[in-house]
Image (spheres, grey):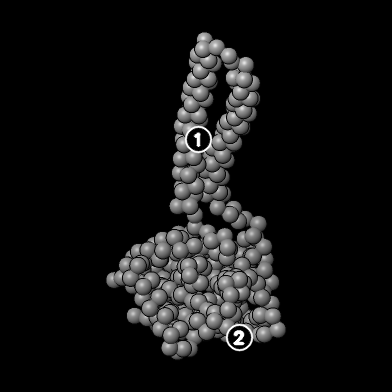
Amino acid sequence: MLIQKSGLKPSLGSASSPSLGGANKPSPVKAGGGTPLDQFAAEVLVKISEEGLPPIPSYFELYFETMLQDKPFDFRKEVAEQLSSQDSGGDEKRVLLETKLKEGFTSIKDILQNVSVLYKQVLSVIETTKKRSQEAKGINNPAAVQNFATTLSSDAEMLANFLSKQATIFKDLYQKSANIVKEVETESIFDARYGIYNKRYLCAQIEQEQKMIVKYGHSSTLLLSSLSAKVIEDIGNDKGVSLVNKTMAKLFMKTSRRSDVVAYFGQGIFALLLKHTDPKNAVRTSERLYDMMSSTNFFLGDKEVELKICCGIVGLSKDKSADETIESVLTALRTCDENAMGPYVLGE
């Protein structure tokens, strides 16, 4: 969580607390005494109750974070320190991933051991071949030729059987390792290059958020952003573009809320899933990002390149699938870039 001494914590969502509709509203929870943190927690529960939402951890975290932005700096700093000390970092998922990786390492170790055995056998074959070569020079009668041929045939058969067995072992170990790698890739939710979530995780979150919208009727918005085509042309090389994209990813992460999903969509496009945020407030987000990128200095040799981004914005709808929503935002993003219509285009 980012803490600033002046103003509120930078946020890509609405500046005010989110308003979430609910049909049946339970009796409000009364904020009691205790420590300042106890009182604040009670305030969060009151807000959740007023919105008619169940007091489950995900909603408590969302409102806790949003309402915390209006608190004094010292209080926010204290809470941030406590959150950092309690963060488990997804230990269960790490254990599962490490287990699969260790299985993969075991398979690789087995492959290396079999390579060692094969190498030793090849050395043995070389020595045997040299020995048989010397023996062949001393052959001077038909009976000796016959015996030599029999011996050579036996050696060749033993080698063929050994290689056949090793080939089967290598095939099985390779397939096992390949399956483990595929499983890890399938379960991966992180883009290591930019240090944010990947497209797979983003799509899953969009689908999940649409289900929540159907149930509770709140607003959430998807924003896709990329460097403008002109900026990419001015930079002129993939290395420079990649460097700017990394800067862009850091800015997105630095200013996003904990409840937002920051992901790399692919092909130079970054995504922000702004939960409990309507398109109007998402527009403010795009303008803020545009200003941040424009004020970032990027030098290519002695030349300074002015960084400009384009954004496509579409509100999530219960009537659209995740794929349809993404396609709508991509269309808006392309329109923004092609027509140079400013920092954003609202899609349908």
* Residue 235 location (% of width, % of height): 59, 80
In the rendered view of the protein, which quadrant contains the N terminus? Answer: bottom right
Q: Can residue 141 be seen from the camera position used here? A: yes
In the rendered view of the protein, which quadrant contains the C terminus? Answer: bottom left
Q: Nearer the viewer, residue 63 or 145?
A: 145
Outermost residue toward the front in this view: 140
Residue 206 quadrant: bottom left
* Residue 254 location (% of width, % of height): 60, 72
Q: Amino acid at mark 1?
A: Phe
Q: Can residue 251 be seen from the camera position used here? A: no
| Residue on which disc 1 sits | 170
Looking at the image, residue 312 sits to the left or right of residue 41; the answer is left
The residue located at (57%, 72%) in the rendering is 238
Q: Nearer the viewer, residue 63 or 99?
A: 99
| SS state under label 1 | helix
| SS state under label 2 | loop
Number of callouts in the render?
2
